[in-house]
Image (spheres, rainbow, N blue to C red):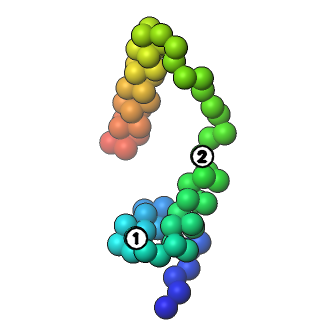
Amino acid sequence: MKSDFSSMTKTELRAFVIANPDNKAAFRAFVDRFTSEASPQTFDIPKSNSEIEEVEILIRQKLAELNMKRDF
């Protein structure tokens, strides 16, 4: 039986890939879906401890924002 990966939600597709790790078509569909929806924005690698700390703060802030949205 062939699954229609394009009709699956992200959550369903992720669960399918986890449940069927040998299904290469499902994995390709998963990667294609998440790659196409990923931000094209790139960032330089932090070069100092202060830059690393700034990145950590930004990550914590973004996670807090996502958690706030999820709670509503």
Residues packed near mark 2 inside 10 Å, few (<14), some (14 to 19) or many (20 plus): few
> What kind of element bears circle 1?
loop
Residue under pointer 2: 38
Mark 2: amino acid: Ala
> What kind of element bears circle 2?
loop
Choose between 15 and 49: the one closer to the eye. Answer: 49
Choose between 55 and 8: the one closer to the eye. Answer: 55
Residue lying at 56% horizontally and 79% vertically, measured from the top left: 4
Displayed quadrant of residue 6: bottom right
- The correct choice, above or below, for 35 with respect to 56 in the image is below
Judged left or right of residue 41, residue 2 is left
Residue 50 position within the rendered picture, expressed as x and y whole percent measured from the top left: 44, 8
Displayed quadrant of residue 34: bottom right
- The correct choice, above or below, for 32 with respect to 47 in the image is below
- Mark sitting earlier along the chain (2/1): 1
Does the image show residue 19? yes
Q: Which is in the foreground here, disc 2 or disc 1?
A: 1
Residue lying at 49% horizontally and 91% vertically, measured from the top left: 1
Does the image show residue 16? no
Residue 41 position within the rendered picture, expressed as x and y whole percent measured from the top left: 65, 34
Residue lying at 36% horizontally and 30% vertically, measured from the top left: 64
Residue 9 position within the rendered picture, expressed as x and y whole percent measured from the top left: 49, 66
The residues tagged by marks 2 and 1 sit, at their Cα atoms, a distance apart of 22 Å
Judged left or right of residue 42, residue 59 is left
Choose between 35 and 8: the one closer to the eye. Answer: 35
Residue lying at 51% horizontally and 18% vertically, measured from the top left: 46
Judged left or right of residue 36, residue 62 is left
Mark 1: amino acid: Pro
